[in-house]
Image (tube, rainbow, N blue to C red):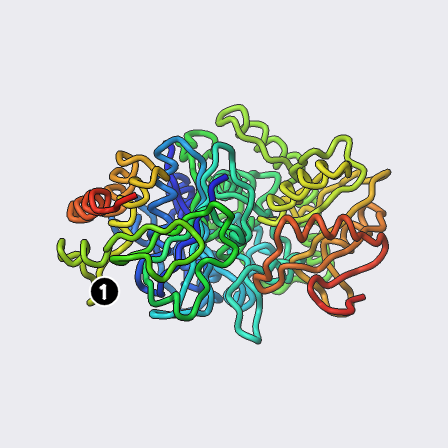
């Protein structure tokens, strides 16, 4: 059905179709609309799941973990400080191999208190064993939430998936949305290590170095195996429903001499910048990274690269830029921009390309930046 | 691409007006986005929201700098905000009020949305509802069709007074 929705409402609408048995959540700006809408679905009977309004985000993830280990499908949503507050349980969910799906509405971390878009909240969870994907439109938020359940629950993966959308820019923007009936696109969850009262076993017991190391290696293997699972899920989704996104979305990329690499809504704004630059005779292209974990293998050789990070690691630099430097062996022009909802227009992005200095880093809007 | 900036005060329904307008444009078969700009403002503070309408998918998320149309739901914001800032040459202004005396340098149209809301007793928490009648005025200006304006209102609200108020605004606006 064709309709219009905000990014938040699109996530909630997708969750309704997947029918999780347990949703445990705590509200936080700018995510609240997601869990409010789901609570309404449950109250009105449109969704049969159990909604647990917990007292904190730490408890939200703990409740999802408890439900998931029984083999139930689970969902939660959070943002910024809420995500950081559940950090311990975020690690636990991945370590316990639980296919929980969580929407995180990307928002800056205080102080100073700031409720606007930034990716540093989710980037701080990048080493926890969660798969992470970042979306750029209302439709993509919907489609990706559907795909996240299938990917997380695939027996080659069995790891949690975090779907990220930019606070306010996408969470509160209204665009057209085609909802769909996923049917058997999402098979029933069969958790092989679910608690079974007829076959008692220990969970989370003291684990020595050998087993601990083996468990970590198994997570790494599953992370690697998720690459073909993501590709297969995307392929099947495209065949059934007609939309494909890829690990990274290319725009006028094939013949581009200089490529803007970004994430989230900035990736769409970058496409407009590319059109502008092409009009000036610059062979520009855009690459919007969708999956941060597993990190994509990209062949970027022979091109000049401008990376925009809506995040930072103090004393290190843009996390995306440095990840690409390490994995794809490039010397990009690294721009830190859009922190705390800083306005970054297509004109600004075109300016990054025009004034690029390969091998150096710039903090957008800071006078005398280095 | 047609770009609209809506000025109001927090709590007056400017964000909902933007969303209704986007739904109506979508029902007309266009692409539309409503991107409210959320500041630290609270009830009563001047706020803006944005609507973009195009025949192609819209990829811009940044704020509108050069609107084709400025809508002023609360004329008192003009004392603190330059509502004409960045208005495209040839751009228009629609204000809630009985005259356009305070607008200089751009074609301006006035319609008494507050009066229409009060006549229909469309009042929430003491504030007249402006976001549904304004759709009628926007339909009169040709931004959206009358049919789609009504559809959008009925998708969001069940109270038919909202539709009647939009019809009244359509009738009353003189172009």
Dot 1, how many residues are within 10 Å of its Cα: few (below 14), some (14-19), or many (20+)?
some
Output the chain of dot 1.
B
* Relative depth, front residue between B57 and A217: B57
Camera sees residue A80: yes
Q: Residue at x 16, y 58 (%)?
A: B118
* Residue placed furthest toward the bottom: A111
Write down the quadrant of residue B9 in the picture: bottom left
Quarter of the picture holding the C terminus of chain A: bottom right
* Residue placed furthest toward the top: A239
Quarter of the picture holding the N terminus of chain A: top left
Q: Is residue A13 left or right of residue A218?
A: left
* Relative depth, front residue between B22 and A259: B22
Write down the quadrant of residue B105 in the picture: bottom left
Number of numbered discs overlaid on the protein picture: 1
Q: Residue at x 67, y 38 (%)?
A: A275
- Residue A207 at x, y percent in the picture: 65, 62
- Residue A171 at x, y percent in the picture: 47, 52
Give the structural element (helix, strand or loop) at label 1.
strand
* Relative depth, front residue between A306 and A130: A306
- Residue A98 at x, y percent in the picture: 53, 50
Q: Is residue A211 left or right of residue B74?
A: right
Q: Is residue A68 left or right of residue A308?
A: left
Q: Residue at x 57, y 45 (%)?
A: A158
Q: Is residue A240 above or below residue B47?
A: above
Q: Is residue B37 above or below residue A231?
A: below
Camera sees residue A8: no
Q: Is residue A310 above or below residue B2?
A: below
Q: Is residue A57 left or right of residue B96?
A: right
- Residue A306 at x, y percent in the picture: 76, 49
Residue bearing the label numbered 1: B127
């Amino acid at each position: 059905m064709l309709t219009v929705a905000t990014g938040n409402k699109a996530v909630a609408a997708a969750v309704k179709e997947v029918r999780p048995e347990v949703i445990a959540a705590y509200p936080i700006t700018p995510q609240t609309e997601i869990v409010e809408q789901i609570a309404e679905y449950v109250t009105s009977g449109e969704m049969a799941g159990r909604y647990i309004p917990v007292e904190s985000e730490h408890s939200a993830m703990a409740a999802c973990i408890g439900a998931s280990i029984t083999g139930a499908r689970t969902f939660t949503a959070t943002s910024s400080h809420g995500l950081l507050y559940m950090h311990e349980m975020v690690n636990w969910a991945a370590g316990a191999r639980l296919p929980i799906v969580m929407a995180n509405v990307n928002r800056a971390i205080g102080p100073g208190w700031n409720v606007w878009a930034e990716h540093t909240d989710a980037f701080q969870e990048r080493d926890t064993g969660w798969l992470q994907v970042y979306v750029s439109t209302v439709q993509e938020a919907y489609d990706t939430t559907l795909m996240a359940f299938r990917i997380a629950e695939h027996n080659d993966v069995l790891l949690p998936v975090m779907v990220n959308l930019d606070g306010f820019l996408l969470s509160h923007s209204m665009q057209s949305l085609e909802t769909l009936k996923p049917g058997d696109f999402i098979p029933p969850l069969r958790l092989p290590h679910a608690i079974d009262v007829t076959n008692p076993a220990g969970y989370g017991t003291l684990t020595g170095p050998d087993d601990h190391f083996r468990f970590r290696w198994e997570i790494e293997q599953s992370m690697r195996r998720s690459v073909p699972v993501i590709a297969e899920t995307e392929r099947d989704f495209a065949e059934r429903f007609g939309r494909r996104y890829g690990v990274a979305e290319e725009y006028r990329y094939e013949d581009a001499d200089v490529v803007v690499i970004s994430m989230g809504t900035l990736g769409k704004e970058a496409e407009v910048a590319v059109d502008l630059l092409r009009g000036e005779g610059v062979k520009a292209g855009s690459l919007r990274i969708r999956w941060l974990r597993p990190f994509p293998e990209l062949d970027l050789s022979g091109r000049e690269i401008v990376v925009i990070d809506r995040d930072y690691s103090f004393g290190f630099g843009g996390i995306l830029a440095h990840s690409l430097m390490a994995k794809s062996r490039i010397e990009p022009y690294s721009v830190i921009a859009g922190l705390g909802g800083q306005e970054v227009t297509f004109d600004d992005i075109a300016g990054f390309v025009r004034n690029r200095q390969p091998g150096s880093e710039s903090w957008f809007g800071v006078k005398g930046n280095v | 691409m047609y770009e609209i900036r809506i000025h109001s005060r927090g709590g007056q329904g400017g964000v909902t007006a933007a969303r209704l307008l986007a739904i109506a444009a979508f029902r007309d078969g266009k692409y539309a986005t409503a991107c409210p700009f959320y500041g630290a403002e609270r009830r009563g503070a001047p706020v803006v929201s944005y609507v973009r309408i195009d025949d192609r998918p819209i990829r811009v998320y940044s704020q509108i700098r050069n609107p084709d149309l400025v809508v002023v739901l609360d004329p008192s914001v003009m004392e603190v905000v330059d509502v004409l800032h960045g208005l495209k040459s040839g751009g228009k202004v629609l204000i809630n009020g009985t005259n356009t005396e305070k607008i200089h340098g751009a074609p301006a149209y006035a319609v008494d949305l507050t009066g229409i809301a009060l006549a229909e007793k469309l009042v929430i928490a003491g504030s007249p509802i402006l976001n549904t009648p304004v759709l009628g005025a926007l339909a009169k200006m040709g931004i959206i069709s009358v049919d789609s304006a009504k559809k959008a209102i009925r998708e969001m609200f069940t109270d038919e007074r909202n539709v009647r108020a939009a019809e009244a605004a359509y009738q009353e606006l003189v172009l």
